[in-house]
Amino acid sequence: MSAVPIEDDGPREDGHGLRVMTSRRVAIILFNLGGPDKQDAVRPFLFNLFNDKAIIGVPQPFRYFIAQLISRRREKLAKANYALMGGGSPILTETRKQAEALETEMAKRVSNVTFRCFIAMRYWKPFIVEAAEAAIDWHATDAILLPLYPQFSTTTTASALEAWTSICDLPVSTICCYPAGQKLAQSHADAILNAWREGGSPERPRVLFSAHGLPQSIVDRGDPYQWQVEQSVAAVRKLLPAEWDTRICYQSRVGPMKWLAPSTEHEIKVAAKNKAGVIVAPIAFVSEHVETLVELDIEYRALAKRLQLPFYLRAQTPSAAPRFIDALADLTERALSAPGKLQSESGGRLCPAAFGLCAQGSGT
């Protein structure tokens, strides 16, 4: 899929009868996981997820058959979970709000560039190829690739970027990760403190920073996700009362293999033994979807009630909160000024050299 030179919406003559472009047109590509928008979409969504080589690393055609098997087995439970949210995932609606807010902010900041956000979901509509086609049809001169995954992983950001580069040759600038930026951290801290105040400002809460889990084997191969989650938590922790207790935990485990530990369920049980109330903060999610609205709000809340925790509060995701949109705009401006480069929130490599699967190379 190739970009072709075109003229802007408002071409004008240059005084010699020649038509010229009036501005740079930058497509901001917002990557996210995606989610089924209706019950009939649940099984194909699951198939697309498990048919990704970044998720199940066996070669084809074996991966195809494994994905078919898993999606059939998980379909009934997944449909029940999405039914609790009205039949489908809210992630597209959430991402549209973020896209609209980011477009508005960029228009305020940069007057000589036209921006438009395009949503690129990995496993359900609008797919990455649809975003690429829309950007080309809009006559984008170049693109900024901005994953809505603050913490880099080969299973999320790398998978999405690889899918994009395989189908589109627009000139791009890429943001690989932004786990510990001040504005992102502040948006999480704001949400935690809001949940605490709305819950009656209970004394000495324990904050459970809950991130989506990964198989331990992926981290052992050099994926920096866990390390970046820890950097996110460290940045937020500085903005919370010093006397509060905090823990990192991982949710959404699938299958029998060893996953990152401790699990969120385990930490809720520990809190019950300690007679500690908790605020659960979804540190690796930037929008509300099944993992927050069902797993955290329904399943783990029921567990906390059964175990008689003093209280169970849940912080909201950043969604389209002004601080988070401001953080995304900062990243977009950074990418705008460095065409063709892949950058972290600070520009260079964030990960220690031990993480060979860092987006910016082996570090050696």
Image: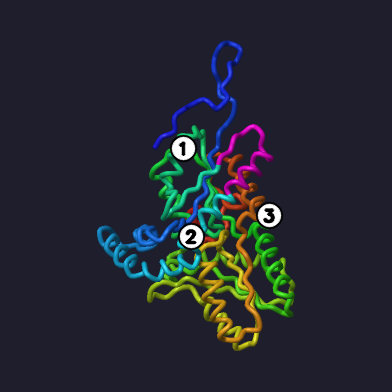
Please tell me how crowded label 3 is: few (under 14), some (14-19), or many (20+) other residues with Cα within 10 Å. Answer: some
The type of residue carrying mark 2 is Ser
Q: Main secondary structure of the magenta part?
A: helix
Report the residue at 48% width, 73% height from top. Answer: 260
Residue 115 falls within the magenta-colored stretch: yes
Is 198 positioned to the left or the right of 135 in the image? right
* Mark linked to residue 170: 1
* Mark linked to residue 228: none
The residue range painted magenta reads 99-116
Please tell me how crowded label 2 is: few (under 14), some (14-19), or many (20+) other residues with Cα within 10 Å. Answer: many
Q: Secondary structure at mark 2?
A: loop
Report the residue at 69% width, 60% height from top. Answer: 186
| Residue 364 visible to the viewer | no
Q: Secondary structure at mark 3?
A: helix
Report the residue at 67% width, 50% height from top. Answer: 326
Nearest to N terminus: mark 2 or mark 1: 2
Residue 216 falls within the magenta-colored stretch: no
Of labels 2 and 3, the one closer to you: 2
| Residue 300 visible to the viewer | yes
In the picture of the structure, the residue carrying the numbered disc 2 is: 89
Of labels 1 and 3, the one closer to you: 3
Give whichever of 63, 346 is nearer the camera.
Answer: 63
Disc 2/disc 3 C-alpha distance (Å) = 24 Å
Please tell me how crowded label 1 is: few (under 14), some (14-19), or many (20+) other residues with Cα within 10 Å. Answer: many
In the picture of the structure, the residue carrying the numbered disc 3 is: 323
Disc 1/disc 3 C-alpha distance (Å) = 30 Å
Marks 1 and 3 in Cβ contact (< 8 Å): no
